[in-house]
Image (cartoon, rainbow, N blue to C red):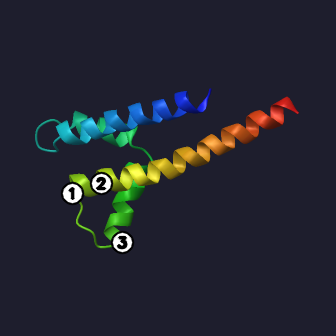
Amino acid sequence: MNRKVFWGIFAATQLVGMLGVATGSPHGNPLGLVVAMIFLFPGSILGLFILDALAIPIGYGGIITASLLINVVCWYALALALRKIRGKKTN
């Protein structure tokens, strides 16, 4: 898998997660929030703890921003790990 495909998959999953946040509601349609939690994982979970620890109000914008920043770091670490594993197999 090349970089463009990897980051394309990242962008698609984050977009679906953001749409889930935008369309979900705990009072009406919780399915969107479940989709958001799954597609924005691990940022959806860690972001809530980080926002709470920093005393930043938890709203749609804060959750999406924190999730995206955390997920970029996690997905980049995953890309490096996959590249390292793939490099070891060829040697």
Indicate which disc, 1 or 3, sits on the residue closer to the N terminus. 3
Q: Residue 65: where, in percent of width, then height? A: 33, 54
Residues packed near mark 1 inside 10 Å, few (<14), some (14 to 19) or many (20 plus): few
Relative placement, left or right, of 3 versus 44 is right
Q: Quadrant of residue 70?
A: bottom left
Q: Quadrant of residue 23?
A: top left
Which of discs 3 and 2 lies nearer the camera? The answer is 2
Distance from Cα at disc 1 to Cα at disc 2: 6 Å
Question: What is the number of the mark on residue 48?
Answer: none
Which residue of the protein is positioned furthest toward the front in this rendering? 4
Residue at the spot x=46%, y=36% of the render? Answer: 10
- The residue at which mark 1 appears reads as 59
Residues packed near mark 3 inside 10 Å, few (<14), some (14 to 19) or many (20 plus): few
Distance from Cα at disc 3 to Cα at disc 2: 13 Å
In this view, 8 is above or below 43 = above
The local secondary structure at tag 3 comes to helix
- The residue at which mark 3 appears reads as 53
In this view, 43 is above or below 49 = above
Q: Is the C-beta separation of discs 1 and 2 under 8 Å?
A: yes
Q: Residue 69: where, in percent of width, then height? A: 42, 54
The local secondary structure at tag 2 comes to helix
- The residue at which mark 2 appears reads as 63
Which residue of the protein is positioned furthest toward the left in this rendering? 28
Indicate which disc, 3 or 2, sits on the residue closer to the N terminus. 3
In this view, 38 is above or below 63 = above
Residues packed near mark 2 inside 10 Å, few (<14), some (14 to 19) or many (20 plus): many
